[in-house]
Structures are given as structure tokens and as C-alpha cells.
Image: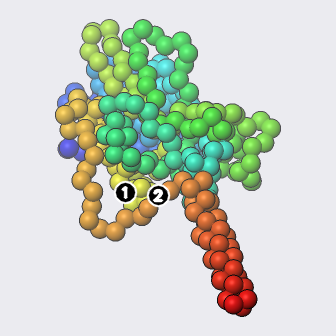
Amino acid sequence: MEIEELSLLTVEAVPEDADCILIYGPSSDISAAELEMLQEYLAAGGNLFLLTDTPSDGESLTNLETLMADYGVTTVEGIVVEGGQSNYAYGYPYYLLPELESHTITSPLISDNYYVLLPIAQGLEISDDLDDSLSVSALLTTSDAAYSKVDGWAMTTYSQEDGDIEGPFNLAVAITKTNDDESESKIVWVGSTSLLDDDTNTAVSGGNQDLFLNAVNWICGQESSISIRSKSIVSEYLTIDNASASTMTLAVVIILPVVYLVVGICIWARRRRA
């Protein structure tokens, strides 16, 4: 892959040889001129990879939201918190372990039981009234017990409160659009920039990196390259969901010691009687 930085403020149009535009963690909204350039680029068969977070300063990304609304996807207010224990890790309900939905991008990860970990994510909503030229598929989803904390970064509790938005939510989607000139545009939108966080990738044995690379290959029409990388021989973390961690803790800390204690008392009592 050849990667170049591009500032849309310094060009009149997106370069024609750009196979894909990556917008990673925008901290402010795109301008009206940038919106127009991206619309023209996508309408001519361009591709987009978008990774966003819930804005920490409360600023809305109005123009970027307008761009994506034309492709049938909008954001859900707030930060997603999981209510199902098997869908988050490390005891933090915002460390999401989403369900991987069937798609060309995710199939290799599903078959090899890979995790994707998204610490702090925003929900993505797919329109119920999609244009016939649009196809939108969920890649990552939450459980039905998830909810979005509308206070976002200012939340004071992880518990669900009045006003919080009930799930389930999409956390990543893949979009295919057939344009008026019969060209095809592909977009992947992930509602968390933590997909590319180094610590996150280590914790999930590279599942996040594989999802990212597979998404890029799908966007750029290199589907023959979609796979998972061979596993590293270096030490890696074991990722388990919170429910499994609680069960293991209960077994190791309480159940096994009690069993050993009971067996020891029984043996002691029998020998004493003898």
C-alpha cells in the first residue's frame, strides 16, 4: 500500500489515482468545500474508510454527517455501553467485544475465532429507507442489552439511566453504492478510532489489525488478499469476555478452595475416627 497525506484544503479535487480516502478520528468538522470534493469523488467511483469517535467537546460533525446520511448511515448520540457481560472485557462495559457479522471482511476472523475490541465507541444507525442503489451491511454489532450513554464523555455512571438510548447498535458498517455512471463506490465506517490503537491490537492478538487490513483490501477491490495474518510467536494476551472472567474467578477463588477444604475435613474426620 502506498500511503500519502492529503489536505483537501490545499487541492481543488481529490486526486484521480486515489484508490481510497482514509479519514481517521476527525476532531472537527469538514468544511463545505471539503464536503463537496468528497461528494464528487465518491460519485465518480471513489472509496472511503472512515473511523470516528464521539466528539469529546460536544461539537457536531454536521458536514461529515451529511455526507454519510446520503449513504444511509447516521451516528447515535453518546457512547455505547454493554449490558451483556459476554460482550465486554476487563470489567469495563465500554470495552466492547462486538459480535462479528457475516461479510467478506469479517469471515476469516469469524472462522478463526478472532476477537475485535473497541474501547469506547459510538453507535451507527442504518436507515430503514435505503435507495435501491445502496447496500449497507453491518460488520460489528452489540448485544440487545447495550445502550448509549447520551452524556458521552461526561458520563458519571455506567448504569443505564433515563434518556439513554436502547440498543442494539451497529459499530461498523460496509456500504456499496452504484453511481449514476455505473461506477461503484465502497465505504467502511467504524464508530471508534481504537480499532488502530496499538495497545488494543496487542490485547486481541491482532484481530483489530486484520479487520482494518481486510476492510482496506475490500474497499480497494483486492478481495483475494483478504485473510488473517499468521499468528506471531511472541507472547500475546488472552482475551476473554467479562462473563467468562467472572466464572473463572468464582471457580478459582471460591469453589475450588471450598471443595479442597471439605475434602480435607472429611479425610481428617475419617482418620480421627480410625
Q: Residue at x 36, y 37 (%)?
A: 106
Of residues 190 and 107, which is closer to you in this image? 107
Q: Circle 2 — which element?
A: loop
Dot 1 and dot 2 residues touching (CB under 8 Å): yes
**Mark 1 packing: few (<14 Cα in 10 Å), some, or many (20+)?**
many
Q: Position of residue 157 (x, y in %)?
A: 74, 52
Q: Residue at x 69, y 76 (%)?
A: 262
212 is higher (above) or lower (below) than 219: below
Query: Along the horizontal axis of the image, is 225 left or right of 214?
Result: left
Return the residue at label 1: 205
199 is higher (above) or lower (below) than 129: below
Return the residue at label 2: 239
C-alpha gap between disc 1 and disc 2: 8 Å
Of residues 101 and 127, which is closer to you in this image? 101
Residue 103 quadrant: top left
Q: Amino acid at mark 2?
A: Thr
Q: Amino acid at mark 1?
A: Ser
Residue 134 quadrant: top left
In this view, which residue lies farthest toward the front? 274
Mark identifier at residue 257:
none
